[in-house]
Image (spheres, rainbow, N blue to C red):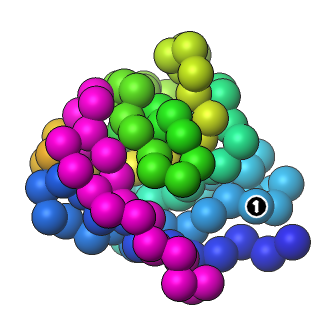
């Protein structure tokens, strides 16, 4: 299984390019290799209910999603390196973003994100 690319449309009208983490190594390392000087990245983790921040160098925003057909935001938090995170009940996927992006893009509890993949799947973002 390969990692795929997707676009995530936020209620604020932003489009975020992300990697869908399908491989073990990608899921294990996530944004761990990102540092303050590298180009910011985003990663979507399907079938994920927890995030480890061990060995992280920078804080990241974590967006907890419920639902596969239309991802609804259950909550967001900015996680610091070496701190544990706790997903809300019902979390089925996690989106990792550079710190500050969730707020800047209008991502908040209760909103819906639009996700488009290379397979032509598309879902509409809303608040």
Please determine whether, in this image, residue 94 is positioned above or below residue 13. Answer: above
Specify start and end residues of the magenta stretch as a single range. Answer: 107-127
Please determine whether, in this image, residue 120 is positioned above or below residue 126. Answer: below
**Residue 29 in the figure: left or right of residue 51:** right
Rendering coords of residue 34 (x, y %) = 50, 57
The reply to whether residue 41 is in sight is no
**Residue 35 in the figure: left or right of residue 16:** right
User: Which residue is identified by label 1?
Assistant: 22
Rendering coords of residue 2 (x, y %) = 79, 75
SS majority, magenta: loop
Residue at x 71% of width, y 72% of height: 3
Quadrant that contains the N terminus = bottom right
Q: Helix, strand or loop at disc 1?
A: loop
**Residue situated in front as seen by the camera: 76 or 37:** 76
Magenta-colored stretch includes residue 22:
no
**Residue situated in front as seen by the camera: 10 or 56:** 10
Please determine whether, in this image, residue 115 is positioned above or below residue 75. Answer: below
**Residue 12 in the figure: left or right of residue 87:** left
Rendering coords of residue 93 (x, y %) = 59, 41
Residue at x 65% of width, y 27% of height: 50
Quadrant that contains the C terminus = top left
Please determine whether, in this image, residue 64 is positioned above or below residue 31. Answer: above
């Amino acid at each position: 299984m390969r990692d795929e690319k997707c676009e995530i449309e936020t209620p604020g009208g932003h489009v975020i390019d992300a990697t869908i983490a399908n491989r073990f190594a990608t899921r294990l390392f996530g944004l761990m290799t990102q540092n303050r000087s590298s180009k910011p990245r985003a990663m979507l983790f399907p079938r994920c209910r927890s995030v480890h921040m061990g060995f992280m160098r920078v804080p990241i925003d974590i967006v907890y999603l419920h639902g596969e057909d239309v991802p609804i935001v259950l909550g967001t938090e900015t996680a610091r390196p070496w701190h544990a995170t706790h997903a809300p009940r019902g979390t089925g996927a996690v989106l990792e973003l550079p710190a500050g992006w969730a707020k800047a893009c209008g991502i908040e509890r209760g909103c819906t994100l639009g996700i488009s993949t290379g397979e032509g799947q598309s879902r509409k973002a809303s608040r």
